[in-house]
Amino acid sequence: MNFLYKLYQFFIFLPTWLVATILAALFTIIGCVLGNAHFWGYYPGKVWSWLTCRMLLLPIRIEGRENIDKHRSYVFVANHQGPMDIFLIYGFLGRNFKWMMKVALRRIPLVGYACDRARHIFVDKSGPKKIQETIERGRSTLQGGTSLVVFPEGSRTFTGHMGLFRKGAFQLADDLQLPVVPITIDGSFDVLPRMAGFNFVKYHPMRLVIHKPIEPQGQGADDIKAVMKKSYDDIMSALPEKYQGYVENKDQ
C-alpha cells in the first residue's frame, strides 16, 4: 500500500500539482493586476490548497469553526509543524486572510511574485527599519478589515513539538485591540516532517483546531505577554501526548 501511494504521488499527484500551482499563481497575478486583490489574492490559493490535500487523499478534520465570526478581523496564530500547514490552513480555515511569511519565499519563481501581488506580508528581519516596515504593513492590512495568519514560532519544528513564540503578531493585535485566535495543527508533521531533500508524503490524518478568540482585556506589555501565554497553552492543549511539551528549535 505504501509503495502504491508513492507511485501515485510521483506519477499522478506531482505532475497535476505542478500544473495546478502554475495556474493558481497565474490566476492570482492576473486577477490582482486587474484590481481585486481581496478576491484573487485569496481564492486561487484556497482552491489550490484544498485540491492539494484532497489529491493526496489525506483525511482532514476541522474543529471549532463556530468560534469565529465571519464579520470580524482576527490575528490567527498557529504552531508550525511542517509545509502541509500552509495547505491545511489555506484550504480549510474558511476565512479570507493574508499570510505573514518569510521574505525568502518571495524568491520562489512565479509563486513568490503571486504572493507579492496578493499583498501577503513578507517578514524582513534584516534590520530594525525593515522589521518596523513589516509591522506597519501588518497594521495596514488589519485596519483594512482583513485577518492575518501568523506562525509565531517563525520556523518549522524538527520534532513535532512547539518552540518559542515571537511577540510580533501579538503586538499587532494589542496595538489594534483585535482578538487573537489560536489554531492547533495536528498531523502535519506526521504527513511531511522537516527533512532535507525530496520526501514522499506519508498517509496520515490531519486536524485543524480553531480555539475560541482571546479578546483584548487591556493594552501594553503585560497584556501581550498574557495573550501569548494563553495562545501557547491553548495550542499545546490540543496536540497529542507525543508532541506535548516545549522542545528547543535551533532554527528560531
Image (cartoon, helix red, strand yellow):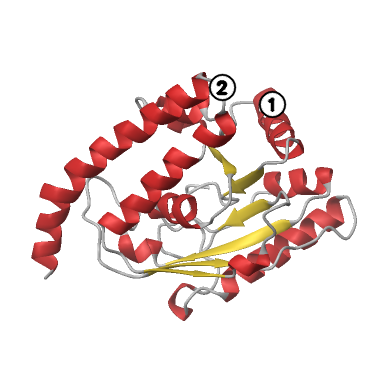
Q: Earlier in the sequence, mark 1 or mark 2?
A: 2
Q: In the rendering, at what x and y percent does residue 34 appear?
A: 51, 19
Q: Nearer the viewer, residue 154 or 50?
A: 50
Say which amino acid is labelled 1. Glu
Estimate how packed mark 2 is, as few (under 14), some (14 to 19) or many (20 or more) residues with alpha carbons within 10 Å: few
Between marks 1 and 2 in the image, the one whose residue lies nearer the viewer: 2
Tags 1 and 2 in contact by the CB under 8 Å rule?
A: no
Residue at the spot 67% in from the left edge and 41% down from the top edge: 146
Q: In the rendering, at what x and y percent does residue 181 appear?
A: 67, 59
Q: Please give the residue where the numbered disc 2 appears in the rendered image.
A: 35
Say which amino acid is labelled 2. Gly
Q: In the rendering, at what x and y percent does residue 83 appear?
A: 39, 50
Residue at the spot 65% in from the left edge and 49% down from the top edge: 166
Residue 122 seen in this snapshot? no
Q: Residue furthest right?
A: 218
On screen, 64 above or below 146?
below
- Separation (CA) of disc 1 from disc 2: 24 Å
Left or right: residue 63 compared with residue 234: left
Left or right: residue 7 compared with residue 117: left
Estimate how packed mark 1 is, as few (under 14), some (14 to 19) or many (20 or more) residues with alpha carbons within 10 Å: some
Q: Nearer the viewer, residue 81 or 30?
A: 30
On screen, 50 above or below 120?
below
In the rendered structure, find residue 64 and report the number of the disc placed on it.
none
Q: Please give the residue where the numbered disc 1 appears in the rendered image.
A: 133
Question: The residue tagged with tag 2: helix, strand or loop?
Answer: loop
